Image (tube, rainbow, N blue to C red):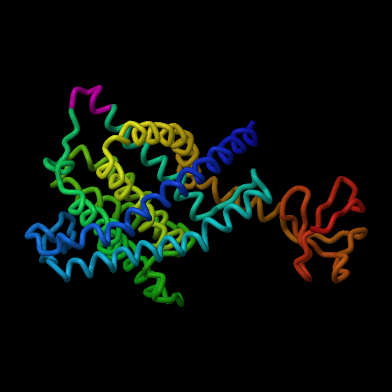
Amino acid sequence: MASVLHSIKELTSFITTIFIIIILSIIFGYMAYSIVYIAPYINDPKFLIPIYIVIPFPILVTFLKGIVAYGWYIFLAIAVSTSGILMAFYGIIPYFKDFFNKPFAYRKNSFQELSELYTLNIFFSLLVVYIMYLAGYIPYTPPGLEEMPVWAQMLSFLHASVYEELIVRTVFLGVPVFLIYLIRGEKISPIRIFGGYEKITPVETVFIVISAAIFAAAHVPAWNLWKAVPTFVGGLILGYLYIRYGIYASILLHFLTDFISIPMAMHREYQFLFGLLMILLAVAGSLFFISYSIRVINYLSGNKKKEIKKEEKKYQPTSWTNLVCPNCGGTVFQYVDKNTVRCIKCGTIIKIGEDDDKKELI
């Protein structure tokens, strides 16, 4: 039964990644166009980009104006584009290669998880809003947000996608975790300040929660208290991607979440299709909400460690007397899965059947 549910989850995930690639392609196109689109408004008095610190509520430091603000916007576009390239290299291409090779295998991939967590966040946010309405409370939206000129929305959303990751995830997550490893005397590259620790230990978990709480608190002044709950969960998701894969993954998810509203702002006639798409993604997100909830429960209860030990024991190197590697003649192999082994000596992958003599070189 578990394998059937996992297969359904992986198939849903695959379909979701296709949708996310399409959406990303569209909004990347709009971001490229925005560089030209906003240029005529450089001298507008409202052409401002706020620079602030979060401790935990936003404290304004200064505004970038005119040509300086425009130069910053180009930098933001480059940062998001770089994140997209890294995601393609480390996430998208490996994911599809792996999926078509073993569609229902257990895997951890930055693009797959970004896609799943994006839809999970949509589902959870809609769930919170729906509960608010049932309770008789109408969620507060900052006045004038939808009435802002499109070019002003472009400034705001692209700025948030990168800047908030730098001042929240890096300052309250990447730096503290890095310092703790240094205090412990562990050798670690300074590049780890920008995430990509791969593992989620109790240290990372604590600071993921702290950074998510600060991220949620920072949104309260503009959105009111109700926004803290979905934003806290969004902060957990961004923090997880930041630690697991690096800042490029959290920037890309933040960009996807915020900048997706730009096409709808420019073409309001497509808002119905946009709403329908969000509902479809939310349906997929409900499945991932269950899946990740189980993972979190297993992690907190310690079941994950037991599973890892069991896997290590199951796939430890094993010697056969009647199985010989056709490339190097080695006789010690490690299980890749139930019917596949890897030669320890040369790395050759061999497909085996019930009878060890029935083998196929991959």
Q: Position of residue 37 (x, y in %)?
A: 24, 57
**In the rendered image, which quarter is residue 137 located in?**
top left
**In the rendered image, which quarter is residue 125 located in?**
top left
Examine the rendered structure and indicate whether residue 100 appears above or below residue 345. Answer: above
Residue occupying image coordinates x 39% and y 49%: 26
Residue occupying image coordinates x 18% and y 53%: 152
**Residue 32 on the magenta span:** no
Q: Nearer the viewer, residue 228 or 153?
A: 153
Q: The C terminus lies in which quarter of the figure?
A: bottom right
Q: Position of residue 86 (x, y in %)?
A: 46, 64
Note whether residue 13 is visible. yes
Note whether residue 300 is visible. no
Q: Position of residue 346 (x, y in %)?
A: 78, 70
Q: The N terminus lies in which quarter of the figure?
A: top right
Q: In the displayed structure, does residue 347 sit left or right of residue 310?
A: right
Examine the rendered structure and indicate whether residue 217 appears above or below residue 201. Answer: above
In this picture, which residue range is highlighted in magenta? 131-137
Q: How many marks do you count on the picture?
A: 0
Residue occupying image coordinates x 90% and y 51%: 358
Q: Nearer the viewer, residue 6 or 69?
A: 69
Q: In the displayed structure, does residue 179 sit left or right of residue 198?
A: left
Q: Position of residue 70 (x, y in %)?
A: 20, 66
Examine the rendered structure and indicate whether residue 181 appears above or below residue 111. Answer: below
Q: In the displayed structure, does residue 10 sit left or right of residue 131?
A: right
Q: In the displayed structure, does residue 128 sit left or right of residue 85?
A: left
**In the rendered image, which quarter is residue 143 located in?**
top left
